[in-house]
Amino acid sequence: MGVAIWKLKLAIAIGSLNSIKIVKENESAERKLEEAVNQIKDRKSGYESSSQEVIRVALIFSLEKREFVKWKAVSL
């Protein structure tokens, strides 16, 4: 399955509560994680009135390793 299709299916499964960044060879996963966290905070992803707990997650996927290499739960 292509990364774009896989990314789409994951985003649909967990809604707009996340930011997924893809890190290529020789890119900094830590920098991408910081970008993803800032994106969630800027968009206030998942910020709606709800009685349920909302979990926002920044995910970094490595094309080289074919796995998630970093993640962080984000609170607003």
Image (cartoon, rainbow, N blue to C red):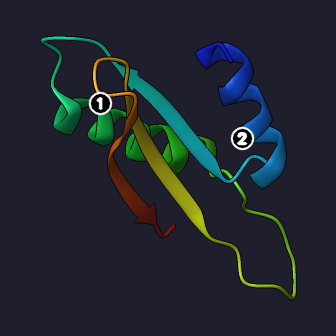
What residue is at 28 percent from the left and 41 percent from the top? 34
Q: Relative to 39, does residue 21 appear above or below in the rendering?
A: above
Quadrant location, the N terminus: top right
Figure quadrant of residue 52: bottom right
Q: Is residue 4 left or right of residue 59?
A: right
In the rendered structure, which amino acid carries the disc numbered 1? Lys
Q: Position of residue 36 (x, y in %)?
A: 42, 38
Determine whether the residue tagged by mark 1 lies in a helix, strand or loop.
Answer: helix
15 with respect to 26 (left or right): right
Badge 2 crowding class, 10 Å Cα cut-off, few under 14, some 14 to 19, many 20 or more, is few
Which label lies toward us, 1 or 2? 2
Q: Amino acid at mark 2?
A: Leu
User: Percent position (x, y) of residue 2?
Assistant: 65, 13
> Does 46 sit above or below residue 38?
below
- Label 2, on which residue? 10
Could you tell whether 65 is left or right of 18 in the image? left
Identify the residue under disc 1: 32
Contact between labelled residues 2 and 1, with CB atoms less than 8 Å apart: no
Measured along the vertical axis of the image, is residue 35 above or below residue 26? below
For the residue pair 6 and 30, the one nearer the viewer reads as: 6
Q: Earlier in the sequence, mark 1 or mark 2?
A: 2
Using the numbered discs, state the Cα–Cα distance from disc 1 to disc 2 in whole angstroms.
18 Å
Q: Residue at x 40, y 47 (%)?
A: 37
Q: Residue at x 86, y 74 (%)?
A: 49
